[in-house]
């Protein structure tokens, strides 16, 4: 089920991206010959008007095939992509990226208006792990214990528990937990290590607390603002990867994306929507990187054309450079996929 939910999320985001190219092409008078989500043999294929629509087996990508991309007989056709004005061609190329940014805003706005925005606090908390030799282990706390009360006070959120622990450094506190069908009262003494606040040595988990920011307009404004924040973090991550501040092994490929998205779907619809929004922004930023074969590479060719006063790079040379870029990206995907698989095996 995790894989199905992950592929559904990727399929929706790829569809949004390609829909941007499709709408922009149609709006600027470019004939669209094929609209496809995925690569390889089609699961579903039909023609409507002048366009063939395809849903293909391999879900990592998609394309909008426009007249002029591999049809030399149509070189002089007015609806050939290469015969449209420079501004129109630029719009077609960046439209997929713009749609992914818009998609992230819509997904976040939907999540915040329905559920709220995830905070750092959690409720219905339970013990996820117990550090070896910690006060919690000595007191008998175990993973999966549900935390009910501390010093007679009901634990509603993580803050209730943390606040009481930090206020009782060196003094025993009574923690009531539910273990299977039993209720137990355990005494544990918070201790301080170094400059850290007092703690008992457990990791906790539970249901994330979500917060709304007002009515529809306020929540939607926050969705727009947070999309900008995600964009900044994504660009910063790419920059650190290029400069060596992040290691190549920190990258996630298709397998890693499926794993993370599948886990988010298990955590509930809000977490699933949030991961979708993050992936949508990552897809937008990735496509803006000026690598041949990506939208950013194609946009770079058009910018060079504009700087040269409309003098184009020969289409055959551009196609050859794009092919090299695509082969590079496929090779990178294979390497990162193997890396993801090794991470899974070693877990």
Image (cartoon, rainbow, N blue to C red):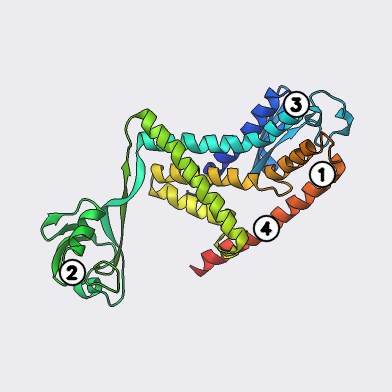
Name of the residue lying farthest toward the left = 152
Which of disc 2 and disc 3 is earlier in sequence? 3
Relative placement, left or right, of 321 versus 101 is right
Between tags 3 and 1, which lies in front? Answer: 1
Residue denoted by label 4: 332
Relative placement, left or right, of 229 versus 312 is left
Q: Are marks 1 and 2 in contact (CB under 8 Å)?
A: no
Q: Give the label on residue 319, or none.
A: 1
Q: Do the residues labelled 4 and 1 touch (CB within 8 Å)?
A: no
CA separation in Å, label 3 and label 1: 19 Å
In front: 309, or 333?
309
Query: Is label 1 in a helix, a strand or a loop?
Result: helix
Residue 181 in percent (x, y) is at 19, 59
CA separation in Å, label 3 and label 2: 71 Å
Vertical arrangement, residue 95 with respect to residue 201, above or below: above
Vertical arrangement, residue 208 with respect to residue 17, above or below: below
Between tags 4 and 2, which lies in front? Answer: 2
- The picture quadrant where one finds residue 38 is top right
Residue at the location (71% across, 21% down)?
A: 49
Residue 72 in percent (x, y) is at 88, 33
Between tags 1 and 2, which lies in front? Answer: 2
Residue at the location (34% across, 48% down)?
A: 119
Residue 65 in view (yes/no): yes
Residue 30 in percent (x, y) is at 74, 26
Name of the residue lying farthest toward the bottom = 133
Residue denoted by label 3: 31
Which of disc 1 and disc 3 is earlier in sequence? 3
Which of disc 4 and disc 3 is earlier in sequence? 3
Vertical arrangement, residue 254 with respect to residue 106, above or below: below
CA separation in Å, label 1 and label 2: 67 Å
Residue denoted by label 2: 169
């Amino acid at each position: 089920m995790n894989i199905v939910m992950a592929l559904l999320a990727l399929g929706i985001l790829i569809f949004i991206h390609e829909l941007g190219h499709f709408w922009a092409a149609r709006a600027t008078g470019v004939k669209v010959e094929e609209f496809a989500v995925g690569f390889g043999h089609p699961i579903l294929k039909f023609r409507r008007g002048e366009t063939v629509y395809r849903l293909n087996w391999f879900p990592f990508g998609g394309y909008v095939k426009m007249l002029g991309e591999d049809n030399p007989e149509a070189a002089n056709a007015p609806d050939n992509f290469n015969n449209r004005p420079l501004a129109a061609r630029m719009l077609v190329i960046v439209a997929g990226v713009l749609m992914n940014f818009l998609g992230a805003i819509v997904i976040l706005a939907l999540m915040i208006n329905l559920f709220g925005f995830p905070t750092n606090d959690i409720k219905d908390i339970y013990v996820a792990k117990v550090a070896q030799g910690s006060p919690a282990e000595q007191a008998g706390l175990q993973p999966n214990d549900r935390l009910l009360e501390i010093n007679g006070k009901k634990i509603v959120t993580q803050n209730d528990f943390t606040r009481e622990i930090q206020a009782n450094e060196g003094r025993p506190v009574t923690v009531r937990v539910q273990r299977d069908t039993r209720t137990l009262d355990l005494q544990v003494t918070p201790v301080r290590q170094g400059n850290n606040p007092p703690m008992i040595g457990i990791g906790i988990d539970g249901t994330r607390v979500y917060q709304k920011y007002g009515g529809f307009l306020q929540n939607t404004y926050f969705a727009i603002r947070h999309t900008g924040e995600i964009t900044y973090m994504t660009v910063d991550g790419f920059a650190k990867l290029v400069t060596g501040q992040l290691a190549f092994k920190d990258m996630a490929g298709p397998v890693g994306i499926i794993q993370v998205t599948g886990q988010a779907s298990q955590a509930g619809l809000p977490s699933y929507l949030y991961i979708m929004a993050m992936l949508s922004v990552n897809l937008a930023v990735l496509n803006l990187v000026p690598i041949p074969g990506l939208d950013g590479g194609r946009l770079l060719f058009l910018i060079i054309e504009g700087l040269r006063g409309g003098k184009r790079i020969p289409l055959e040379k551009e196609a050859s450079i794009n092919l090299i870029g695509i082969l590079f990206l496929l090779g990178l995907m294979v390497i990162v996929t193997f890396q993801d698989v090794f991470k899974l095996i070693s877990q």
